[in-house]
Image: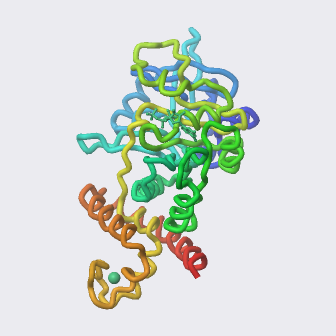
Amino acid sequence: MHIDFDSLRGIGLSQAIVSRLGAEGIPPGLRLARVTETQRDCLTLHDGHEDHLARPTHRLHAVLQARDAPPTVGDWVLAGPDDHGAWWVHERLDPVTQIARRANDGRRQQLASNVDTALLVMGLDLDFNPRRAERYIATVRAAGVAPVVVLTKADIAAHGAQRVDELRHRLPASVPVVAVDGTSDSARVALWSWLGEGQTLVLLGASGAGKSTLTNTLIGDDVQSTGGVRQGDGRGKHTTTARSLHFCTGGACIIDTPGLRTWRPDADAASLAATFDDVEALAGGCRFRDCRHDGEPGCAVRAAVAADRLSNYRKLLRDAQRGESTPLERIALRRKWKAIGKAGSERTREKRR
Ligand SMILES: Nc1nc2c(ncn2[C@@H]2O[C@H](COP(=O)(O)OP(=O)(O)OP(=O)(O)O)[C@@H](O)[C@H]2O)c(=O)[nH]1
Ligand SMILES: [Zn+2]
């Protein structure tokens, strides 16, 4: 099976994706490509060399529709041209990770596939909100994506250094917290270790947090004009130049779709446990096994965990239990995070000693 690794690695191809190919490999006439933009009924693909406008075959369209899993930016697909030179997508490889949101009708809507790192962008100014950071972290972890908190406006925020310290102390040691001036090239240096060749990132954060500014800085030129371009409705524009997956000069890919702009974190209980691993670890020392750390006698948590962090945990847990996933999803996630949570709490204990 021939895979052009040299050019595909640069757009995010990993061993995990290749292993999705299975024994048959790539059928003749087709090649691996990545979805960089989705429109109503066609997709923009990149094959490591150039863009192609393509449509899913009728068969694939039906399969994906039945699974309620439409093609998503960041997906890897098998595609190729027909005798008339028209490009068709024949297969979609199952994503390794996926960031989704819950639509108003409760259904999951996929926003970005095969993401390695989520930069949780938060301003050190009025935007600063540790509770929101905790919610973001729990949610992207639930998607299998590694969170990095990026605090912008370090150059202008009055209590910047203090807030950085506060957050570093509050969050699990496993979550990096990086303060940057998003308008300066120094931000690219500060985030260098997540921008390696083939890494795929998304930026999440409230409006005005500095996502566009940082995206521009990381991409290395001004493709994504701040506050412009993406606002409009791109539907019907078949000769699109505003793709949603950008290639950074250093070799990483940044996914920026309108959906991610309005993404609201929606955490689940298992990933909350990992994000609040200090609470989980301490809870073993409470007198009552079902202690809610809410004033019960013999509580080991209340004395040791900051009140605001603890009350945010309780609130997020209530929210999560309300919108909880199916029991099977819960079991799978809990298994996944048990191991990670255990490693995390050991690190936290180490740090707090
Ligand atoms: N001094 C300074 N200004 C920043 C920094 N990051 C963002 N800004 C400014 O803050 C404002 C908002 O930044 P944007 O990048 O548009 O924010 P956004 O998160 O993309 O906002 P939406 O497009 O509404 O989602 C702009 O005027 C930026 O110039 C920073 O690190 N330092
Ligand atoms: Zn307790």
Q: Quadrant of the C terminus?
A: bottom right
Q: How is the image coloured?
A: rainbow
Frontmost residue, 132 versus 261: 132
Image x and y of residue 41, in percent: 41, 20
Frontmost residue, 350 versus 128: 128
From the viewer's perspective, is 299 left or right of 215?
left
Image x and y of residue 90, in percent: 51, 28
Vertical position of residue 132 compared to residue 226: above or below: below
- The residue positioned farthest toward the front in the image shown: 158
Image x and y of residue 278, in percent: 47, 75
From the viewer's perspective, is 321 left or right of 58?
left
- The residue positioned farthest toward the top in the image shown: 84
In the rendered image, which quarter is residue 326 located in? bottom left
Q: Residue at x 71, y 45 (%)?
A: 189
In the rendered image, which quarter is residue 77 located in? top right
Image x and y of residue 1, in percent: 70, 37
Q: Quadrant of ligand 2?
A: bottom left
From the viewer's perspective, is 108 left or right of 218?
left
Frontmost residue, 157 versus 134: 157
Q: Residue at x 41, y 23 (%)?
A: 58
In the rendered image, which quarter is residue 35 located in? top right
Vertical position of residue 298 compared to residue 174: above or below: below
Q: Residue at x 63, y 24 (%)?
A: 29
From the viewer's perspective, is 293 left or right of 119?
left
Is residue 124 shown to the viewer in this render?
yes
Q: Residue at x 51, y 64 (%)?
A: 166
Is residue 23 shown to the viewer in this render?
no
